[in-house]
Image (cartoon, grey):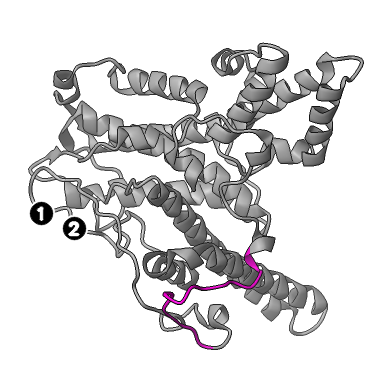
Amino acid sequence: MDHCLSRHSTLSPATFSSPYPPPSLLRHPLTFSPRTALNFPNNHFRSGRAASGLSIRPAGRTFPVIASAGASHCEPSSSLNSPLEPRSQPGKFLSSVLQNHRQLFHVAVAEELKLLADDRDGAVSRMLLTVGSDEACLHRRVAQLKEHECQLAVEDVMYMLIFYRFSEIKVPLVPRLSRCVYNSRLEILPSRDWELESIHSLEVLEIVREHVTTIIGLRADSSVTDYWATTKISRLMLGRVYVASVLYGYFLKSASLRHHLEQSLALANQDHHLGCRTSNQFQELCAYGVKNLVFDTVSNKQSVSYGQGSTNQGMKGEPLKCYVMGLDPETLQRCAKLKSKEAVHLIENHSCALFGDGKTGLVENDEVILTSFSSLKRLVLEAVAFGSFLWDTEEYIDTVYKLKENN
């Protein structure tokens, strides 16, 4: 998507769109060019849950990952070279589609989500229909097993969507550190700082850079010597820093969209006479609806740029940094809280796969690692981007498959 590759562009309301295509559009028939080489069986997506259900001729290359100290110990942990391997058949199927035929990825995601929703809802319906009968206990157990199976599959779908967003900006996820640490030394090359920062608006980027400085003590104007200076950190502490940065990225996405909504509402109410310009903007606001403006799956750059474009015409809005610092504790907690249990499990599984020992997957390891500040910054920026992409993914999936609320 172009908005992930162009840095800090200003978008007009006409280009205000989601980073994921609407599921309804994905169900339309596709037109393939003569160069497209596909071999689909009948009803390919339903039979595609098995590894052999879809046969696609490889057409693109995968993204290489280099994260080592000069040795060849950082081997791919999966065919996608991601820390977490898909555990379910839908996850493995989407992994294959993403590698072999990217243009079909969103079609496959929409279809798999619909199938998972139908499977889960069907099991629940059968359970309700048999209440009071001799088969009630059986169908209740079947519904519980089906819900657990679908939850694992949806978490894999979320992970594949996040991986796709990283691949759009040409940034591979750091592989498992157990494969990358050699002689207690870790280096992650190339840094990809520019690409990881390009997904944020200028206001959000300022806050992200302050977060990096606070976490690792590396300022944005640091010299090259400072970047390549080494420091020691335990693997357990590194995992905690990564998870905290994921949650921070998630919070920034939620807070920035809330800030945009309040700016839009303030602008709409500024002109009491509802002049032509303000009236049109207010109608546009109502067309989206309050829920869509707060929770629509849009990138930070799009949403904030849209708010900035309209705010600059009418009034000078409050900067995002001041807005975040002025939030009350209840609002801070609401913005920072993960909305679904699937998102909670995904962060846990991803961090365990990334920082675990490779055998048990546990992060409880006090091994001290020698690494550069540049590598630390790479991990923190990736984690912030992961949290931001997770927010988008969570909202997109919830429109098709109802996620479990994180109470």
Dominant secondary structure of the magenta stretch? loop
* Numbered mark located on residue 75 in the image: 2
Q: Secondary structure at mark 1?
A: loop
* Membership of 78 in magenta stretch: no
Segment tinted magenta in the rendering:
26-41
Q: Are marks 2 and 1 in contact (CB under 8 Å)?
A: yes
**Mark 1 belongs to which amino acid?**
Ser
**Mark 2 belongs to which amino acid?**
Glu
Label 2: few (<14), some or many (≥20) within 10 Å? some
Location of mark 1 (residue): 72
Q: Is residue 48 above or below residue 263?
A: below
* Membership of 35 in magenta stretch: yes
Q: Secondary structure at mark 2?
A: loop
Residue 323 seen in the current view: yes
Nearest the eye: 281 or 69: 281
Q: Residue furthest bottom?
A: 42
